Amino acid sequence: MTFAYVSRTGTRNRAYPFSAIVGQEEMKRALLLAAIDPTIGGILVLGDRGTGKTTAVRGLAGLLPVIRAVEGCRFNCDPDRPSGTCPDCGGGARGTARYRRIPVPVVDLPLGASEDRVVGALDLEAALVHGRKSFEPGLLASAHRGFLYIDEVNLLEDHIVDLLLDVAASGINVVEREGLSVRHDARFVLVGSGNPEEGELRPQLLDRFGISVEVGSPSDIAERIEVVRRRDAFERDPQTFMERFKRGDGRLRTRIRKAQALLPEVECPDAALTFASKLCLKLGVDGLRGELTLLRVARATAALAGRQHVEVADMVAAAPGALRHRLRRDPLDESGSTARIERALSELSEG
């Protein structure tokens, strides 16, 4: 299988194999869990430049199994879940449409993208040449049932952030302009990366991410050397390098497929839910989104491990990523979010 991602132009490009990435275990695990259960929400990866954030997201595309989409539909509609609002296929009866198999889309949203490029707009060629109004789908349509990746998400323009928030909340993209009125499904996993030193995210967007991951440059000399060696080998001979890690990516792909199949059967006992609620109360997390995310991450973790039940240990492992970006700032506590979560986990364990 070719390792690829969808670029901002919509074409597929070769990407660095996911299994070849050295270190950054928390980031890689978060991406795998989001692939298993997209309802976890988006993934936010914050850290220094050159730490493999973009490489990992694009490498993920090579691990994802193919999906079925309605033949001739530009909106990646699922033939088993018809949508009556689709401008192309109009939904139809469940399972009756002709379909094709496509890779799960992983789409780049560049910082300078216009609103029309993101949500879609009037097809000018059809309007000028043929004199008819038709809709040209945007990046949100391309990302439906897949991943929408934004590098330097903290620098995204406010009006684009507002659009993403609306669509992320409803799962539907609504376009009203130039006499056109179009609605289509747009459900995707939002993946953002950035350097926190260059600016903070708006709280409304930050809250939409299910998992927050902190990455840094490796401090181990041997690890740094291996990163450089592998990247150099990939750039010198991409095909040979990808063949070298083809089996590793294949094993990860199989694990994802098995975990996706097992996920609906995974149960969460009351003891684990009680632990999640106690932890969120102790940390002062607003609302219930923290507990819901803990539940989903822990369930995906159990499925990845091949278990049909969630353990308290799964909640403990999920806590930093699911909660670090949901904590209120405490002016009397100079420690970071991760340290506060670890301290709360320790106190709950002792109790």
Image (tube, rainbow, N blue to C red):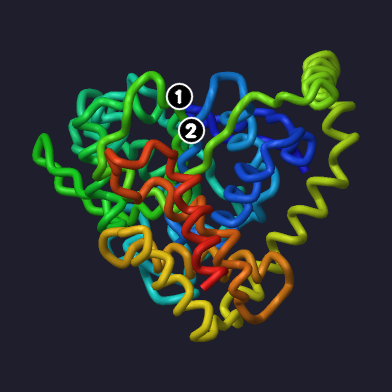
The foreground one among 4 and 344 is: 344
Q: Which residue is mark 1?
A: 195
Is residue 114 at least partly visible in the picture?
A: yes
The kind of secondary structure element at disc 2 is: strand
Q: Which mark is residue 350?
A: none
Residue 113: x %, y % from top left: 33, 24
Q: Is residue 63 above or below residue 123?
A: below
Q: Is residue 274 left or right of residue 248?
A: left
User: Which of the two labelled residues, at mark 1 and mark 2, occupies the earlier sequence position?
Assistant: 2
Q: Is residue 137 left or right of residue 133?
A: right
Q: Is residue 110 above or below residue 304?
A: above
Report the Cα–Cα distance between label 1 and label 2.
6 Å
Q: Residue at x 33, y 43 (%)?
A: 206
Q: Residue at x 63, y 28 (%)?
A: 52
Q: Is residue 152 left or right of residue 26?
A: left
Residue 309: x %, y % from top left: 63, 81
Q: Amino acid at mark 1?
A: Asn
Residue 5: x %, y % from top left: 60, 35
Q: Which quadrant does the N terminus fall into?
A: top right
Q: Amino acid at mark 2?
A: Leu
Q: Residue at x 82, y 54 (%)?
A: 251
Q: Residue at x 26, y 31 (%)?
A: 123
In which image quadrant can residue 56 be found?
Answer: top right
Q: Which mark is residue 46?
A: 2
Q: How many marks?
A: 2
Are dots 1 and 2 in contact, CB under 8 Å?
yes
